[in-house]
Image (tube, rainbow, N blue to C red):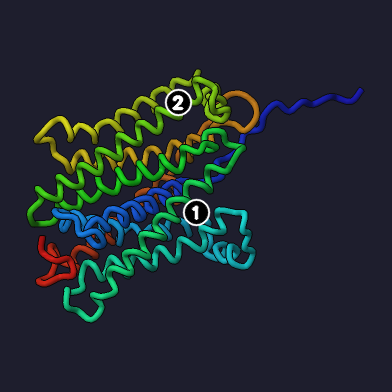
Amino acid sequence: MPAIIETVNITHEAAWLPWAVFYFFFAALAFSAAIISTAWTLLRRPGWKRAARMALLVLLSSAIVAPVALLADLHQPGRFWHFYTHFTPWSWMSWGALFLPLFVALAIVYSWLALTQPKDGRLAWAIRPLAMATLAFALLVALYTGMEVMVVKARPIWNTALLPWAYLFTGLMGAAGLALVVDAFIPGDHATAERKLSKVMGYAALLSLLTLGLWLAEGLTGISDAAARTIAAISGSAYWRMIGLALALSLAVPILGFFIRGLPLAVLGLIAVAAMWAFRWVVFMDGQMIPKTGAGLYAYRLPMGADGLLGIIGIIGLWLAVIIIVTTITGPAPRQGAAQPAE
């Protein structure tokens, strides 16, 4: 008599590796820094001169590193070409293949000119048009990076309309936090920039917490079936309870700058950057550990090689090298008569 074999569940390896986390991390830093920088380059808001400069440094360095992480996740640069030879209008990835290169090119040119071009320089006239174009593509990249994950119905933790908003708010929090960290290492008057950037960081952290709270409420009340299925899958896991609490606390810390004077804002900024990265790690890596079918959770162990710890160290080291080079070339402060006029 033939045996009957019933397959209950199959364990799958993670399809998206830590490289993807860093791609979305640096892409969010870049589009968020582009948004923050326009407070000065476009709106000429009082007190934003130095804060916008710090945001421009974050924008330039992140825009250079983000495509490296993406190509590493694709494992070979040739795969990127397929997005152009097989364009599919219904795919957010295909649209992203158009948005991202244009955004990166605009971001690099715009931030470089804004950081280095004298007010009466030959190319000073191009800064405002480039800022507007960069802002437009920054918003498109923010939309695409959220939508390309949100539309995956097979992963209920991803399939929520709140995800693009969470990406945007945590991105603004992290970009402002990283600008505070960069500001701490560059000589000059820190006070005004710290006030502006800490407000952006704090409000963005608050909006991030509210967004995650709304997702939780949707799941607990059953308003969102995807959120309810996610909560049901992870409710019995001590690990998920631990990371949920840790993420909530790390998002709450940047808000403390509103209430407690004298806190080291660079440290709060570093925590904000870590919380931004941790949110993406939970969504991508831990989210893949929730089975599409069946019960239980998959296990993931971070490998030591290029697809794991070594890759994480390498991409962070690359960003550090880029920001050091950029700040060395552009100088610690705006040049005399720079395109950003005196306040």
For the point 56% across and 30% down, the residue is: 226
Residue 34 marker: none
Q: Determine which residue is flagged by label 1.
A: 73
Q: Secondary structure at mark 2?
A: helix
Q: Is residue 79 left or right of residue 23?
A: right
The quadrant the C terminus occupies is: bottom left
Dot 2 alpha-carbon crowd within 10 angstroms: few under 14, some 14 to 19, many 20 or more: some
**Cα gap from disc 1 to disc 2, whole angstroms:** 30 Å
For the point 52% across and 38% down, the residue is: 158
Q: Secondary structure at mark 1?
A: helix
**Farthest residue, direction right:** 1
Q: Amino acid at mark 2?
A: Leu
Counting from the top left corner in percent of width and height, residue 26 is at 37, 52
Q: Is residue 326 above or below residue 172?
A: below
Q: Is residue 58 above or below residue 9?
A: below
Q: Is residue 186 left or right of residue 219?
A: left
**Farthest residue, direction bottom:** 122
For the point 43% across and 24% down, the residue is: 239
Picture quadrant where residue 208 is located? top left
Q: Is residue 226 above or below residue 53?
A: above
Mark before the other along the chain sequence, 1 or 2: 1
Picture quadrant where residue 223 is located? top right
Callout 1–callout 2 Cβ contact below 8 Å: no
Instruction: Using the rendered image of the protein, determine whether residue 53 is visible from the camera's viewpoint.
Output: no
Q: Determine which residue is flagged by label 2.
A: 216
Dot 1 alpha-carbon crowd within 10 angstroms: few under 14, some 14 to 19, many 20 or more: many
